[in-house]
Amino acid sequence: MAAIGNLVEALGNFPRDAGPLYQQLAAAITRAVERSDLLPGTRLPPERALALSLKLSRTTVVQAYARLREAGTIESRHGSGTWVRRAGKTAWPSPQEHEVSSAFRRNVVFRSLVERSGDAISFVSAQLPPLPEIDEAARAVARRGARSLGHNGGYFPMGLPALRQAVAAHFTRGGLATREEQVLITCGAQQAISLIAGLLVARGEAVVTEDPTYIGAIDVLVSAGARVLAVPGAAEGLDLDRLRALMALRPRLVYVVPTYHNPTGGLLPEPVRREIARLADELQVPVVEDNTLAELGLAGDAPPPIAALAKNAPILSIGSLDKLFWTGLRVGFIRGPEAWIVRLGRFKALSDLGGPLVSQAMATLLLEHVPAAIKTRRREVSAKLALLTKLIEKYLPAWTWKKPAGGLLLWARMPAGDAEELAQIAARHGVALVSGSANSPDHRFADHVRLPIVADAATMKEGIARLGRAAAEYQPRPRATGFDVIV
Ligand SMILES: Cc1ncc(COP(=O)(O)O)c(C=O)c1O
């Protein structure tokens, strides 16, 4: 049976095509059935309830259901309701795919990357255009030729040796002495999180995260079958007492984003870093620190990784060159105790036999340009942030936020209402939006919106103006307790 919330998530935001709304709703339900996001036999909510949740008229839903009945996608019986037809050709998902399907229902960001996302102005994925250093590195690698990369073939599951050395030197310069053997090169920081989950987390085991936290980490952990225990707060607001209590229960791992938190943009204070390092050491609970955004600070130098504060603690430090230089580079890394790096390397070998060497050779060169790239991105993101906040003050004057210390997101709070509902209306105004609740393992922060600070000025102006119109149209309904019942 589909709780209304689940069904709304499975449909995503629409419209994405021209044509009447009822057709688009019918198409969205059909797509959800074809992808096994709605399984045969799933009961659909009554028309009125779905209309309320999707901010549509009841007639639109009645017409959409009628169309789906004609097409044989759903069945209804008077008095028994409406359900997805059981005799369809839909293949039943594996248990793993079932978890992935639930993750993607919530994760609008990854979903927009996998599925066709239409031509709406997107405030979904936080990606900057490539820096010119990318093109220079590509040319330099081309000049040297492929033979300079691997004399014995091209499989390097642990990473190109020159890049492992360069990353180790990068950590050492940043205050954490590191040897080549302590570094595994990954396909972006995202794969780093997946490999760590594969090594450490079995179905049903507890893991601890901040709340809110990085969407992509929640989904990897949930898809691995983990029980995610969320500590309220992040960065400056982290509830340290709660974290201590949960670490004492010896979870399989603790995942934190200390240096420019995704999505809040905060910086984890020094005393809290020390305490996390101490607890990891004393309790031998693995801590995964995701420093993917550490090079995107808006002022001052980023602090060294937490691992620098407890040399022998089981701490894995994730980093990436993608956010700084270009997300298409797909080069990330994990730094940790050597034995763990070898174990993670086995998972990497099974999954892909090693990442592409051309990107890794480029990354080796790019590491020399990190200080200059930090300055360029700081100027770029500061200007974009100034514009974004000015536009919000103009078009969404009741929204509030705290200035981020770094990263690529503004974590804004609406005065009232539910950002998922606003996202439905915004989609009809041609803007795609991510609700705060997608960043929360416990689905909190429904009144928050996560706005990437990446669009060019013209797109940002038009996007926020549209969002202002959507917000003016949105009338939050009072939250009735128990509304989200199974129907
Ligand atoms: C905290 C965090 N970790 C990991 C990633 C994924 O990074 P990559 O592009 O290197 O896979 C992101 C991307 O936004 C991120 O913000």
Image (cartoon, helix red, strand yellow):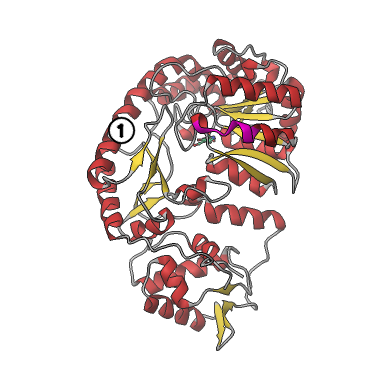
From the viewer's perspective, is residue 321 above or below residue 468? above
The answer to which of 64 and 413 lies nearer the viewer is 413
Q: Is mark 1 within 8 Å of ligand 1?
A: no
Residue 244 in the magenta stretch? The answer is no
Q: Position of residue 246 (x, y in %)?
A: 68, 37
Residue 239 in the magenta stretch? The answer is yes
Q: Position of residue 36 (x, y in %)?
A: 60, 64
Q: Could one spot residue 57 in this view of the protein? A: yes
Res. 296 image quadrant: top left
Quarter placement of the C terminus: bottom right
Main SS of residues in magenta:
helix
Residue type at mark 1 is: Lys
Write the start and end of the magenta stretch as one range.
237-243
Considering every residue shown, the one lying at the far left of the view is: 394
From the viewer's perspective, is residue 139 above or below residue 199? above
Residue with the mark numbered 1: 384
Q: Position of residue 470 (x, y in %)?
A: 30, 56
Quarter placement of the N terminus: bottom right
Q: Helix, strand or loop at disc 1?
A: helix
Name the residue rendered at 30%, 55% in the picture: 471
* CA neighbours of label 1 inside 10 A, class few (<14), some (14 to 19), many (20+): many
Name the residue rendered at 62%, 32% in the picture: 241
